Amino acid sequence: MGVYLSSFRFKQKGSGLAEFGLAAVLLLAIGLGTVEIAHWMAVRQVLSLALQQAARTGAVNHGHPGQIAESFENALLPLFTPAASAQQRLHQHLEAVQVQLGAPAWHMAVLSPHLAAFNEFDPPEPFAGASVGTPATLSLLSAAHHLRRIDNDYQDLQHRRYLARGWPEGRGPGSAQTIYEANTLTLALIYPHRPLLPLTRQLLRLLPGGSANYAARILSQGYLPLSRKISQTMQSHPVRWPSLASGKITYDMTGPKLADMGQACPGCHHDSGGQPSPGAGSNTSGGNTDIGPGISDAPGAGQLPSTGIAPAPGGAEDAPIMEDLCGIALCCAD
């Protein structure tokens, strides 16, 4: 009888240990998942603020992509504390991501102004540029007299002129934008977020996708593609600058070119700097648009739906409009 009771107590003790182990594993998983989600939300918030700052910089600097990229990366510094070494840690991180992806460390597409708008709204007067600004900006503008631009002044008068020309709602035949929409800077960002946990990175690598486009390449390397979009009223004449040689900022929605890996800059995208590229999107100020994995394969992916509502005379609101561009379910959680 004593032997039986001892065996019974041993079995009870073993069962209790198994239940405790299972509960401990579940609690540990929940705790680690909470930390991962908190880290992701913090990065997402910093990206929103950084994209907002980049759009504001572009709005007052004629949409210059170099100024936009510099402003965006400087706004990412809070992610790389301590402050004394944040700049160095940021550069090291971006270089490591670029090497691992074989593509730019992040990508931003200029959806508006539409490339065709620079042909339709380019005024005949010579480009005078700005009279105030940093020496670097004034130097760039002094060499931009040959580039196409869009007039930011007297937009209501311009709108009436295009209506009298017979353009429906004042929209250009190629861009489908009004002069108000052409003077709105719209940026769409895809940023590779590196999860804290190695297990999370391994799970992301198992998701279907491949490496045909930028967002899919991010997933295949264990990063989470975070997508954001913002619209900001231009406070200067938009200029048709060439895309950055680094491929970080381009004028279409197809993302960096990933096919030509033998170039000096892997994944860099180059365009002509003057003619519209297929798939460049027109502006929209409302509604979410998916630019996640599979964007370059979707028919008509370069066209965004128009609201059909012309802004009031004097231009759109000055406050930037931030939108989510979710490629997978996780980045859509609020």
Image (cartoon, helix red, strand yellow):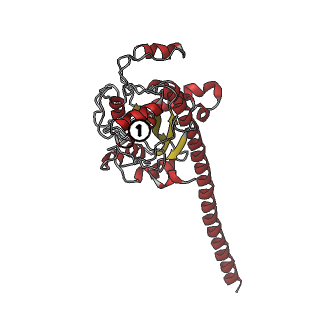
Q: Viewed as shown, does residue 298 lie left or right of 327? A: left
Disc 1 target residue: 178
Name which residue lies at 51% across and 37% down. 313
Number of residue marks: 1
Query: For this rendering, which residue is in front, 325 or 233?
Result: 233
The extreme right residue here reads 2
Residue 91 visible (yes or no): no
Query: For this rendering, which residue is in front, 197 or 115?
Result: 115
- The amino acid on which the numbered mark 1 sits, given as a three-letter code, is Thr
Where is residue 110 shown, x and y percent of the image?
A: 42, 35
The extreme front residue here reads 164
Where is residue 146 shown, x and y percent of the image?
A: 35, 17
Q: Viewed as shown, does residue 168 lie left or right of 69? A: left
Where is residue 169 shown, x and y percent of the image?
A: 39, 43
Quadrant for the N terminus in the image: bottom right
Q: Quadrant of residue 190?
A: top left
Where is residue 112 shown, x and y percent of the image?
A: 42, 36
Q: Residues within 10 Å of mark 1 (few under 14, many from 20)?
A: many
Instruction: Look at the numbered disc 1 and give the secondary structure of its residue.
Output: loop
Residue 197 visible (yes or no): yes
Q: Quadrant of residue 25?
A: bottom right
Name which residue lies at 41% across and 17% down. 127
Name which residue lies at 46% across and 29% down. 95
Q: Quadrant of residue 147?
A: top left
The extreme bottom residue here reads 1
Query: For this rendering, which residue is in front, 45 or 40?
Result: 45
